[in-house]
Image (cartoon, grey):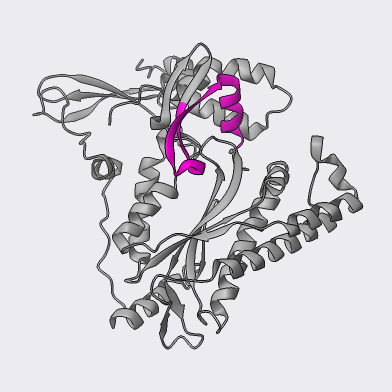
Amino acid sequence: MPRPALEVADILRQHGQAYREAHRGSLSYSQLRVMRAIEVCRTAALGGHVEECDQCGHQRISYNSCRNRHCPKCQSLAQARWLEQRQADLLPVPYFHVVFSVPKQIAALAYQNKSVVYGILFRAVAETLRRIAADPKHLGAQIGFLAVLHTWGQTLEHHPHIHCVVPGGGLAPDGERWISCRPGFFLPVRVLSRLFRRLFLQHLDHAFQTGRLRFFSALEALANPTEWKRFLATARAREWVVYAKRPFGGPEQVLEYLGRYTHRVAISNNRLKELTDGKVNFAYKDYRHEGRQKVMTLAADEFIRRFLLHVLPPGFQRLRQYGFLSGHARAVKLARCRELLTGSATLQPPVRFEDWRARYEAVTGESLDRCPMCHQGNMVMADILFPTQDRKQAKAAGIDSS
């Protein structure tokens, strides 16, 4: 794949150090780690290896990846590996895409309490979908679904929301039949929205009462119980956005969607246009004007600030599965769903790739084994490049290959 003309790494390499110095007291350890990882990704700092064509002698240096989940360059192979595993989960039914969002004042609180509030967001979404789906007035079934946390909007502002991909139906309470939803309709979004708001605010208030929330800067007043009650009342009076998109056409479309959403980071490199005079130009969709493509210009300092808004707490899982897609019993429950839908619990094994090179070729259509110069020979390992910080130790041990 050709390298984009501009990458997030380029912006951080040029302006990251100045940003660290200017915001030394406000950057978290996680944010500093993400910046450093992206800056050194696929550079000599991480080491790599030299490959040589066994026919024409052409050489190519391949540096190692940082593998950080916030790095735009390190997601495609992780995404392909994850999709391999998800093929076996797909059922021959329509799939729905449901999105849950929170108001701006909740988003501000979430930024200061990421682990707690993002966790509440997942919990409220899961309880809402499962409770409404189990209600005989709506579906009366146990559903399964996948939920993905996104914390950004198109212009990189902080906008936490959860995308859910849900099969259009579920298991009857006795597990003896599959209950399908109505064609083109899953669950009523107004009912989902009201229950989601109530559950979220209940869990949020419990977090406050148990001392799990922290308040800084403009939100410091919320530590006062009276101000907190006023805050909850204001949030309760607002309409919370829950919407369902049109159902997918089939399993292939579901996989295509999952590939675009599950391993997405705040901004992809192909949206970056230009870095000139300390300003970053990037493309975005203006959903207030029918998704029209536009270009935004931000100072590099502001671009980095917005990018770092979306660094997740260490160990926080932003992709989760629920219902018959969760837990140790998932394989058994999925087999039962498939048996009820098709008469057979067996499934053709998904395609497995022997190594990351084969997977890369499947994702990009390009072979890393074939020589890019003569197109006849194969690229074979010729030398190992140690990370730059390890070169002195390697040289002392007599194995320096730099």
Query: Dividing the image into 4 quarters, which one contains the C terminus?
Result: top left
Look at the image and tell me whether residue 220 can be seen: yes
Q: Nearer the viewer, residue 269 or 346?
A: 269
| Front in this rendered view, residue 290 or 361 | 290
Locate residue 58: give its quadrant.
top left
Where residue 120 sits: x, y (%)?
Answer: 67, 57
Q: Is residue 37 magenta?
A: no
Q: Is residue 304 magenta?
A: yes
Residue at 41% of width from left, 33% of height from top? Answer: 73
- Tell me, yes or no, if residue 315 can be seen here: no
Q: Quadrant of the N terminus?
A: top left
**Residue 192 higher or lower than 225, as above or below:** below
Q: Residue reaching furthest front?
A: 289
Left or right for 65, reference 315: left
Residue 201 in the image: above or below residue 213: below
Residue at screen point 74% across, 24% down: 25
Stretch of the chain drawn in magenta? 282-309
Determine whether, in the image, residue 296 is placed left or right of residue 334. Answer: right
Residue extending farthest top? 277
Between 47 and 238, the one nearer to me in the picture: 238
